[in-house]
Amino acid sequence: MTNIYAALEIGTTRTVLATGEAKTGERLRVTCHAEIPSTGVRKSQILDINQATQSIKSVLREIERKQEETGDSLTIANAFLVVSGQHVKAFPFQGTTQVEGQRVDDDDIEEVRRAARSNALPKDVELLDIVEQSYGLDALPGIVSPKGMSGHILKLDTLQITTNKNLVDNARTAAGEAHIELRDPLFAATCAAESVLSESEMRDGVLVLDLGGGSTGWAAYDDGYLAAADVIGVGGDHVTNDISYAFQTTQAQAEMLKRKDASASLSSPADPSPRANLFGSSPLMEARTVSRRSLDTVVNLRLKELFTIIRNDLEDRDLLHRLNAGAVITGGGAALYGIKDLVRQELGMPVRFGLPVNVDGLENEQHAESFAAIAGALLYAHKNYEEKSFFPSIFGRFFK
């Protein structure tokens, strides 16, 4: 049996749609993906549903065009939604239950799992995920499997990830206008981790940095589970805005300077020449040059501020020194020259780019890191469809 999945990401700078398929027990392959610039979206929030719908329709047409080239004729009916932005929150929650017998049995474990899901959320909050971390029994924490152990009070520590329900509903409305039903909303940073991390990295401690246009999500893993996560409201668009303000350029000119000439690290310039060319925004405007050192300084200051915030947060959570496998960079921001050097300098750990190694089909993509989250969403669907995970499965056929 071949299972087919789809995932949609409505980001600040781009809208991405991807499909994947896998036979039971086999690796997932991303079979088709497309992206177009987003409209009607700012800071990962839809501000104009009609424009967002047009973006979804456009990326859907691009998928259909690519399918026609390969002889496929599937019509996407529903997809998982990849969610990012500062409205995503992660917080710890502990479920507890009293052990009925002398030793912990399956019923006790199931009861404490139910207790961990009993947290009452506000009406405008939607649950993205509940991550089981470790068990505790009486005064003993950090238990991996409590079955058969003696004790009285069984505990389960979880990390609960939520988002603003109204914002997700807006995405559902926009997608619905394009005749796509949205399934589970999924957190972009943990989706990216799903596609790029190995089990050994999660055990040793690793940080995923998902650098988006409107925000940066991060997810820290330790002892094999998600220990903490957050979203900072700083992304690639903020760097573009800084360049535009500093050099009095249009947004398009600033974006081109960032992509073509800028470096995030002052010690590793993208080009040794002292000046970068800035072409006029119209044929009537003259070209000029800007100081490459000044350009790099503008970019460096904004991103240095971002990584300082993340570093301080990790230190406050007593996590920074436990991330022995280092940091992994995903998202569109991974393409910025010098970004790996800057992360290494600011966080003081080894760094690599997050290629989606846990799926097939993206090997020839020039900046495959930018598709890590969408690939992880497809992988999440595939795993849960086959494994019938702890949460009730909501997967059916994704194409009509």
Image: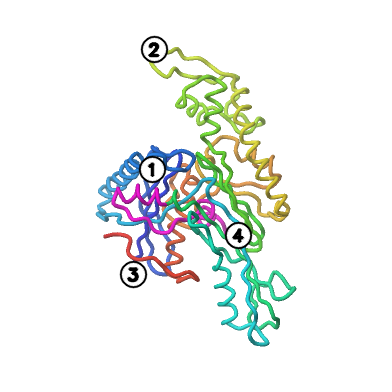
Dot 4 or dot 2, earlier in sequence: 4
CA separation, marks 3 and 4?
32 Å
Dot 1 or dot 4, earlier in sequence: 1
Mark 4 lies on a secondary structure that is strand
Q: Is residue 171 magenta?
A: yes
Quarter of the figure with residue 297: top right
Give residue 284's mark: 2
Q: Amino acid at mark 2?
A: Leu
Mark 3 lies on a secondary structure that is loop
Dot 3 or dot 4, earlier in sequence: 3
Residue at numbered disc 4: 226
Q: Amino acid at mark 4?
A: Leu
Mark 2 lies on a secondary structure that is loop
Dot 1 or dot 3, earlier in sequence: 3
CA separation, marks 4 and 2?
54 Å
Q: Is residue 362 magenta?
A: no
Instruction: Say which of marks 3 and 4 sits in front.
Output: 4
Residue at numbered disc 1: 35
Residue at numbered disc 3: 1
Q: Amino acid at mark 1?
A: Glu
Outermost residue toward the right?
139
Q: Amino acid at mark 3?
A: Met
Instruction: Say which of marks 1 and 4 sits in front.
Output: 4
Can you say which quadrant of the picture contains the N terminus?
bottom left
Q: Which residues are drawn in magenta?
A: 169-198
Instruction: Say which of marks 1 and 3 sits in front.
Output: 1
Percent x, y of residue 10: 42, 45
Instruction: Say which of marks 3 and 2 sits in front.
Output: 2
